[in-house]
Every structure is written in structure tokens, then in C-alpha cells.
Image (cartoon, rainbow, N blue to C red):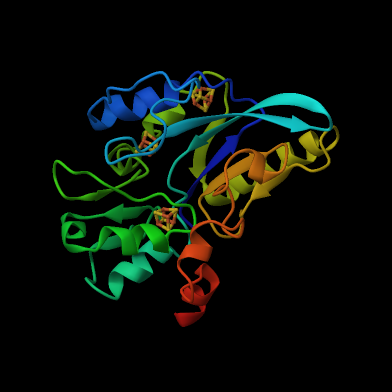
Amino acid sequence: KGKTFFIDQTRCTACRGCQAACKQWKKLAADETVNTGSYQNPPDLNGHTFKLVRFNEVEVDGKLKWVFFPEQCRHCLEPPCKMMADAFIPGAIIQDEATGAVLYTEKTKDLDYQTIREACPYDIPRKEESTGLLTKCNMCIDRVRAGMLPACVKTCPTFTMHFGDRDEMLAIARARLAEVQKTSPAALLADSDLVRVLYLCEVHPSHYHHHMVADAGGATDRIGPFSRRALLAMR
Ligand code: SF4
Ligand code: SF4
Ligand code: SF4
């Protein structure tokens, strides 16, 4: 059944510890950025930023609310990026049997970047210009195989991030959802039957990001006939 993250966004304080831990563990280059008027920095994922805390100020029931979204690859159960890659270079994107982690190999250098990026319903893959590789979160597979937690999960000081066996994560996510729904009836677990990163959204998913859920009208629209569900049906 593999591994799964549970990310309880009701607890996230946007400290960005997870984002920094990811950079540190993976030895990823820093970005020189400018102040864009938001604490979100850098402004988007890139070839050497696999985890990004997105900041949004939204109006919910007439009140302003900060919502924070620690974004990363969802490690889809049936990953459309891999399905698309297999049509061109089999083995360029692989799925680890034990954990379910979706892993990008050296062969991603030879894939068409836009085609793979557009196949992802969450708009995750990026190209690292310095190496030509397509990149994203790899579930800290080296740490997980050694019995350690992913660096981002280990670092999170607020218990927003959890990681473990899928059944256990589903159970704690559903229990926490029931608790949150007592005061926020619209709360949900985004695409929990499709992905290995369970995001608990207290308010409508679109408030966090337009790619929070697969059917929110993002990449799935751009890839035309290769909609996510169509790709799944092709298997
Ligand atoms: Fe980064 Fe590892 Fe967390 Fe993925 S699991 S976002 S690679 S720290
Ligand atoms: Fe691939 Fe995107 Fe799913 Fe990650 S979220 S496994 S990049 S399709
Ligand atoms: Fe949120 Fe935890 Fe990441 Fe801090 S480390 S931004 S609290 S998920």
C-alpha cells in the first residue's frame, strides 16, 4: 500500500521550515529574489525548489483569512506524468514499488519539458536549466529507505506534516477532518483517493491555489484530450 503524507493545513503557520529543510537536505541552490509584496518566496516552484509555501489572503464569509499551502509533488497513485513519459522514453519516470514514490531519473533530460509539465494535473514538474533534468520532490526516498522521515516532515514544528504507511495516514487524516468539520463544515481532504499527499483544506481548495485539486480547471484544461481521467482510462 506504500507511504503517504498527511498535511493538516489548519496547523500551518507558514514558517517555511519545510521549504528550507528541503533545500538543505537536497543541497539545492538558493534563488536571488526581489520583494514582490508577498512573503511567498520564490514566487513559484522551479528546477531547484521542490517545496514552496504559498501564501494567500482570502475572504471567507466576509472575513479576511490567511491560508498557507506547503506545496510539493503529490506522488499520484497512478501518475499522469509517468504515463506520459512512458509513451516517449519508458523508464525515464519510475514509481518505487515499496513506497509508491514517483521518481524522475537521468533520462528525464531527453523528455519534452512542456509535455511532461502539462501532463501533471497539479503543475509540479520543472526543468533545472543547469543540468537539463526535469525535477520535483522525490519523497526523500534516500531517507525513507533508511527508515527516516522526509526532511520537510521531520522539520515541521507545528505537526502540520505527517508521514507514514498509507492506511495509518488515511485514518489520522479522516479523524482530523471530522474534528475540523465541526467548526468548518466545508473542510475536505483534497483528491485523497488519487494522491499520496493528503492536504486537509479548511476552506475551498481554490483559496489555496488553482492547482490544489486536479479538477479545479488548471493543467487538466491545458492538456486537452489528455485529461487526467482520460489518461487513467487509457491504462
Ligand atoms: Fe523536499 Fe523531501 Fe519534502 Fe519532497 S519529501 S518536499 S524532496 S524535503
Ligand atoms: Fe507526477 Fe504531478 Fe502526480 Fe507528481 S503530482 S506524481 S509530478 S503527475
Ligand atoms: Fe507549515 Fe510546517 Fe512548513 Fe512551517 S514547516 S511552513 S508549519 S508545513
Residue 150 x, y percent position in the rendering: 39, 34
Residue sitting at x 45%, y 67% = 223
- Report ligand 2 position as a quadrant: bottom left
Q: Nearer the viewer, residue 67 or 35?
A: 35
Whether residue 16 sits left or right of residue 194 in the image: it is left
167 left or right of 163? Answer: right
* On screen, residue 20 above or below 136: above
Asked if residue 217 is positioned above or below residue 44 in the image, the reply reads below
Q: Position of residue 89 (x, y in %)?
A: 21, 71
Total numbered circles: 0
Which residue is rendered at x = 17% and y = 60% of the image?
A: 107
Q: In the rendering, at what x and y percent does residue 43 appear?
A: 42, 31
Question: Residue placed farthest to the left in the image?
Answer: 131
- Identify which residue, 152 or 116, lies in the foreground: 116
Tell me the quarter of the image containing the C terminus: bottom left
Position of residue 173 relative to residue 110, above or below, is: above
Query: Residue 119 lies in what quarter of the image?
Result: bottom left
Residue ranking furthest to the bottom = 234
At 34% from the left and 30% from the top, the residue drawn is: 22
Image position of 96 (left or right of 160) = left
The front one of 187 and 46 is 46
Position of residue 203 measured from the top left corner of the image (x, y, whole percent): 73, 38
